[in-house]
Image (cartoon, rainbow, N blue to C red):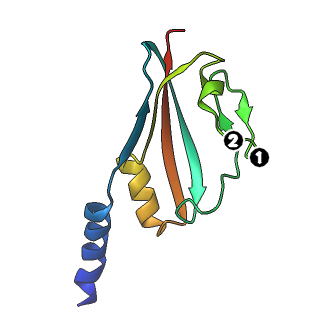
């Protein structure tokens, strides 16, 4: 019986891990500039990030500071902010039983 338990568990982890996306759009024109950062969270997002996030020109945003979309756009307005768990983010969260939960943040800057 244990011979089938491990493959079945791995298959369940891969099939039951979900991808989701949340987007907030503003009423302005988008530019071609899109910044993408990965934010590391722990215990399903209950514990804050412990490592700095690297922004545009590799300026670190320290864990004690909030991750502001305006900082990623160098002071310009923000057109859209998306947060999502990619397939691999979900696999990592499932394999670690949500101890480590990476989230991807994608910010589209506005033209002005």
Residue closest to the eye, 51 or 78? 78
Q: Position of residue 45 (x, y in %)?
A: 56, 59
Q: Position of residue 62 (x, y in %)?
A: 75, 40
Note whether 63 is above or below 58 in the view shown.
Answer: below
Residue closest to the eye, 69 or 13? 69
Mark 1 nearby-residue class (10 Å; few <14, some 14–19, many ≥20): few
Kindly identify the residue that appears in the image at 66 percent across and 17 percent down.
75
Q: Quick one: which residue is furthest to the front in this view?
A: 27
Which element is circle 1 on? loop
Look at the image and tell me in which quarter the N terminus lies: bottom left
- To which residue does mark 1 refer? 64
Kindly identify the residue that appears in the image at 42 percent across and 20 percent down.
27
Measured in 3D between alpha carbons, the distance from the residue under mark 1 to the one under mark 2, in whole angstroms, is 7 Å
Mark 1–mark 2 contact, CB under 8 Å?
no
Note whether 42 is above or below 89 in the view shown.
Answer: below
Mark 2 nearby-residue class (10 Å; few <14, some 14–19, many ≥20): few
Kindly identify the residue that appears in the image at 50 percent across and 47 percent down.
103
Q: Is residue 29 left or right of residue 2?
A: right
Q: Quick one: which residue is furthest to the top in this view?
A: 112
Look at the image and tell me in which quarter the C terminus lies: top right
Q: Position of residue 54 (x, y in %)?
A: 65, 33
Q: Position of residue 57 (x, y in %)?
A: 66, 21
Q: Is residue 13 left or right of residue 89?
A: left
Tag count in the figure? 2
Q: Is residue 81 left or right of residue 60?
A: left
Which element is circle 2 on? loop
Kindly identify the residue that appears in the image at 66 percent across and 26 percent down.
71
The circle on residue 90 is none
- To which residue does mark 2 refer? 66
């Amino acid at each position: 019986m244990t011979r089938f338990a491990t493959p079945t568990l791995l298959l369940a982890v891969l099939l039951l891990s979900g991808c989701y996306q949340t987007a907030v759009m503003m009423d302005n024109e988008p530019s071609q500039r899109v910044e993408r950062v990965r934010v590391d969270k722990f215990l399903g997002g209950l514990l804050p990030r412990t490592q700095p996030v690297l922004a545009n020109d590799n300026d670190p945003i320290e864990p004690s500071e909030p991750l502001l979309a305006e900082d990623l756009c160098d002071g310009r307005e923000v057109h859209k902010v998306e947060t999502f768990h990619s397939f691999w983010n979900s696999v990592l969260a499932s394999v670690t039983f949500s101890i480590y939960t990476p989230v991807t943040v994608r910010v589209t800057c506005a033209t002005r």
